[in-house]
Amino acid sequence: MSIRYATNILLALASGFVLVSTFAFSPNVAGWIAFGVTGVLVLAMTAGAAALPRRGWTQRGLDAAVVVLAAWTIVESLVFDGATMTWITFGVAAGLLGLALAGLTAHELTTERVVHSLDRSDTPAPHQESFT
């Protein structure tokens, strides 16, 4: 399994969890969930994965956007409260989910390109003669 795929799936799951929890729990609880999951956990995961080789320029750009949003989540969950924090957390989680889906799409397009380049054959198939 590719590390790009794994980190994007984990990002999608974490941001989806926070997206749902913003309205499933009270604003105070949702703020702490956002701080822990999309702030600290996602920031640590993305920063660690970004240091690995062979991430590609597209994934590195997505990683940079994820790091900015994760850092903003830490700030906004400590500064804001109530409905303001709920809606900002919801927006950030939706943005992170969108970035995860973009990363998964970029991974699949890269994989699809490799499969097609391996599958493509420039020589015609050998013609079999029939003895009828």
Image: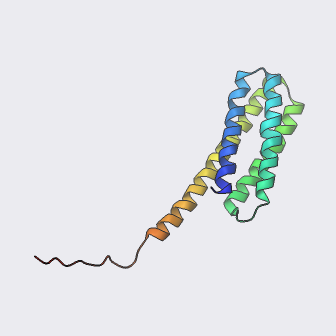
Residue shown at the point (68%, 28%) measured from the top left: 20
Q: Is residue 13 left or right of residue 112?
A: right
Residue shown at the point (80%, 42%) measured from the top left: 41
Query: Could you say where residue 3 lies in the image, as x and y percent from the top left?
Result: 68, 56
Query: Could you say where residue 32 lies in the image, as x and y percent from the top left?
Result: 83, 29
Residue shown at the point (81%, 40%) measured from the top left: 39
Query: Could you say where residue 72 lies in the image, as x and y percent from the top left?
Result: 83, 41
Is 15 in front, or is 129? Answer: 129
Quadrant of residue 129 within the rendered picture: bottom left
Position of residue 68 relative to residue 57, above or below, is above
In this view, which residue lies farthest toward the top? 26
Query: Could you say where residue 7 lies in the image, as x and y percent from the top left?
Result: 70, 50
Is 67 in front, or is 124? Answer: 124
Indicate the colouring scheme: rainbow
In this view, which residue lies farthest toward the front? 131
- Identify the image quadrant of the N terminus: bottom right
- Identify the image quadrant of the C terminus: bottom left
Position of residue 72 relative to residue 46, above or below, is above
Q: Is residue 41 left or right of residue 95?
A: right
